[in-house]
Amino acid sequence: MSIQYTTVGDLKVGSYVMIDGEPCRVVEITKAKTGKHGSAKANVVAIGLFTGQKRSLMAPVDQQVEVPIIEKHVGQILADKGDNLTIMDLESYETFDLEKPTENEIVSKIRPGAEIEYWSVMGRRKIVRVK
């Protein structure tokens, strides 16, 4: 588990955060200053990297949250097995199977021999783009 910690107040749109154990990309942040003795609160809306599900987090701006460390890798598609793809990492030459992405712009470019960029986050992998 590769994570680091930051405060809710330091999050920005486009950054990544763990919400309910799922790595998410922040799409909206609203901050509200409460009354005389309260602390400022932030409402963070994020979309899961792997599920695409919208999640929200309401917390004080000084609360610590987990930020996933995203490892970016380059690989090559060896075979298309219907719902899965066999990928070879171009640095370590490790081969593994990944689920085929659902985004149309990525699916249209998938073919054996194509180079891809994939992310490794919290022990899970996802194809981000086809080069």
Image (tube, rainbow, N blue to C red):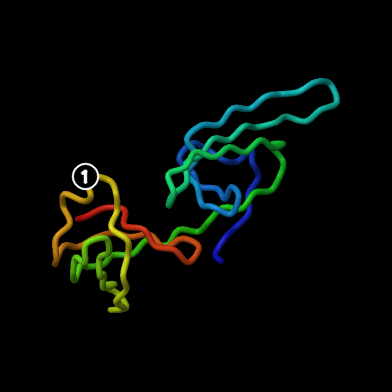
Q: Which residue is the extreme one toward the bottom?
A: 93
Type of amino acid under label 1: Glu
Task: Specify the quadrant that holds the N terminus.
Answer: bottom right
**Which part of the image, by quadrant, shows the C terminus?**
bottom left
The residue depicted at 20 percent of the width and 62 percent of the height is 115
> Residue at point 36% right, 58% down?
126
- Exactly how many numbered labels are in the figure? 1
Residue beneath the point at 43% across and 52% down: 50
In-front residue for pair 33/24: 24
User: 130 above or below 32?
Assistant: below
Going by the image, does 84 lie left or right of 113? right
Residue 46: x percent and y percent?
51, 39
In the picture, residue 29 is in which quadrant? top right
In the image, taking residue 67 as reference, residue 47 lies left or right, namely left
**Residue 8 % position (x, y):** 64, 41
Counting other residues with Cα less than 10 Å from the Cα at mark 1, is it few (<14), some (14-19), or many (20 or more)?
few
**Front position in the image: 71 or 99:** 99
State the image coordinates of residue 19 (x, y, percent, origin top left). 59, 47
Residue 95 lies in quadrant: bottom left
Query: What residue is disc 1 on?
Result: 105
Task: Work out which residue is located at the far right of the displayed protein and give it.
Answer: 37
Q: Position of residue 5 (x, y in %)?
A: 63, 54
38 shown above or below 115: above
SS for tag 1?
helix
Q: Is residue 107 left or right of residue 127?
A: left
**Position of 25 compared to 36: left or right?**
left
